[in-house]
Image (cartoon, grey):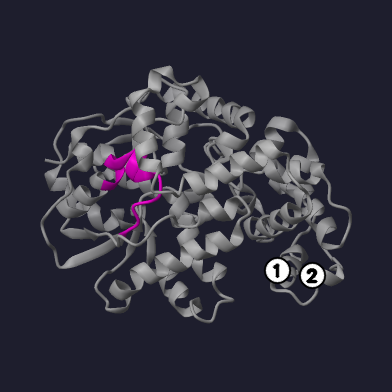
Amino acid sequence: MQTTLAPEFQGTREGAEAEAILRKCVHCGFCTATCPTYQLLGDELDGPRGRIYLIKQVLEGKPVTRATQLHLDRCLTCRNCESTCPSGVQYGHLVEIGRKVVEDRVERPRSERVKRWLLKEGLTSPLFAPAMKLGQLVRPLLPALLQEKVPTRQPASAHRWPTREHERKVLMLMGCVQPSMMPNINSATARVLDAAGIQTLVADEAGCCGAIHTHLNDIEAGLADMRRNVDAWWPLVSAGKVEAIVMNASGCGAQVKDYAHALAHDPAYAERAQRISELTKDLSELLPDLVPRLKPRLRARGPRKLAYHPPCTLQHAQKLRGGVETHMAALGFEVGTACSESHLCCGSAGTYSVLQPELSHQLRDRKLANLEPLKPEVIVSANIGCIQHLGSGTATPVRHWVEVLDEALA
């Protein structure tokens, strides 16, 4: 796809990147077959190909309208289209560039501006933890939409952290909302790794991975989050004290693995960001090493029949498929994935479920309907957003797979 950039984008880093991505586009439309919003709405402009044309027009200097913004807003950034694309179009990077340009040129209604500000500042604020505790105390009194976002109180084991030291060490990002919403995911991760002889370290100065600010078009704040994390991790990384940076939220993993790209233009951080991205692993990538160490310690307790929802950030952004199912099965669990549409997003997509609740609920219910025939004891996933979102629409427990594994350990 040929494009002629408007003068203001010529010679810029964003313009050059967008132009390189657009050149790969071949108009085939394979992506529309796997785009969740196109499946729901049937509108070409609510599919990747249509959105690419909108971004192309924006970069060529055509008028930017509120309608352009709405079509880009409806994109989940699930990157399913990248998995389908025969040309390797990096749609995720292109849509970030397009959204930022549109955000700068189209003023949102005041209600939207307030909501988006509250999300990007509130979710990453130290005040989020006490606010979540208050929400859990008054949960029955909250409106249904807010109840969906407030999980029930976590078990006492959620704060039980292993104390043994091991020669093998990894860093782990705690996340911005996970310690308050579902702390058991982090502690279960540490306990499972401890059982396999690996010590989990945490850099207190690290915080949000940068995804929240970035996906809400506050690119500079997102970059600041990334630089802060690089600084927090670098002393341990540069000293060779950790063998990996482990992510148990696949959304964070996808973002941190992209630090090398995001900070490539920053001479003070480019080299370090590259190293951070290279060291970053989703927790499931450790499973081949963990299985033989954990298998002798497993006991026949807890749920065994699981339905697994692979998050988009795992299977499409990180291109990791099949690992959880295969290795959990090797540990004695019966794991099934949806026979239909296992590749489609559940509708969580970070803050999407708050900003686009109608589409989000449709996708959630569609996903749960496809999982229901498996008749699982527990639905498992690998990202807190998916877990909370799916759990709001079913009576079947929804948990992180590492929590189920932790429960089965002696």
Q: What residue is pinned by disc 2? A: 9
Picture quarter with the N terminus = bottom right
Q: What is the three-letter code of the residue carrying label 1?
A: Glu
Label 1: how many Cα within 10 Å (few below 14, some 14–19, many 20+): some
Provide residue 359's location: percent of width, then percent of height.
63, 31
Provide residue 401's location: percent of width, then percent of height.
32, 40
Q: Residue furthest bottom?
A: 267
Is 30 left or right of 185, judged from the image as shown? right
Task: Check whether the beta carbons of the residues at disc 1 and disc 2 lie within 8 A of each other.
Answer: yes
Q: Judge whether 311 appears above or below 303 on screen.
A: below
Q: Is residue 397 visible?
A: yes
Is 35 left or right of 330, judged from the image as shown? right
Q: Judge whether 194 appears above or below 393 on screen.
A: below
Compare residues 150 and 261 and report the one nearer the observer: 150
Q: Judge whether 159 appears above or below 143 on screen.
A: below
Q: What residue is pinned by disc 1? A: 14
Segment colored magenta = 172-186
